[in-house]
Image (spheres, rainbow, N blue to C red):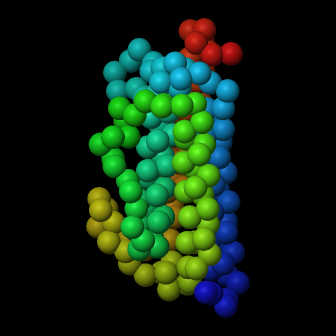
């Protein structure tokens, strides 16, 4: 555990933004039917709200729990995009469990964990701090995708 407040504050800041963004993504699914959760815009390479949320949660789990904290994770990337919501609150339940695991894992990080290199599955060796940046940026990109997808869905009358 870090004794210097600086890395702890930095980690809390990243956690605040990452969690806030993922909370917003998962929150955007609240109150939607299974049909709405699984609706995809009529354009190539678009995704459903549920698939986007599933992907963001998988990315956070792989990068924060696995890459940064060195713990086993259950990410299955190939299954994220075709994912269909089994029940409307599936993403919320998954995020609640993952959020606790991530918070507990991040609480144990030190300055050495932020500065040290980690082997990333697609990016080569990156620092722990870069892992946090990757997750924050990735979640924010998909937050925008969620907002656009909800707007398109509302425009076609699929959601209120």
15 is higher (above) or lower (below) than 21: below
Q: Nearer the viewer, residue 67 or 98?
A: 98
Q: Does the image show residue 36?
A: yes
Residue 96, given in percent of the width and then of the height, sits at 62, 52
The residue at 41%/74% (across/down) is 70
Looking at the image, is 123 positioned above or below residue 91? below
Residue in the foreground of this view, choosing between 106 and 101: 101
Q: Nearer the viewer, residue 81 or 84?
A: 84
Question: Residue 31 location in percent, x, y?
Answer: 67, 27
At x 47% / y 24%, what residue is drawn? 38
| Quadrant housing residue 108 | bottom right
The front one of 158 and 6 is: 158
Left or right: 4, with 39 as reference point: right
Residue 1, percent from left and from top: 61, 87
**Can you say which quadrant of the picture contains the C terminus?**
top right
- Residue 25 visible somewhere in the drawing: no
């Amino acid at each position: 555990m870090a004794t210097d407040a600086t890395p702890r504050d930095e980690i809390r800041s990243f956690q605040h933004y990452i969690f806030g963004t993922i909370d917003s993504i998962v929150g955007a699914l609240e109150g939607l039917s299974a049909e709405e959760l699984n609706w995809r815009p009529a354009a190539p390479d678009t995704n459903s709200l549920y698939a986007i949320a599933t992907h963001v949660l998988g990315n956070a789990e792989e990068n924060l729990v696995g890459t940064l904290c060195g713990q086993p994770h259950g990410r299955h990337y190939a299954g994220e995009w075709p994912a269909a919501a089994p029940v409307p609150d599936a993403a919320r339940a998954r995020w609640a469990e993952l959020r606790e695991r991530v918070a507990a894992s991040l609480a144990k990080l030190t300055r050495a964990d932020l500065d040290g290199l980690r082997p990333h599955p697609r990016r080569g060796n990156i620092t722990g701090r870069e892992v946090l940046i990757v997750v924050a940026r990735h979640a924010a990109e998909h937050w925008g995708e969620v907002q656009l997808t909800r707007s398109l869905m509302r425009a076609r009358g699929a959601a209120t």
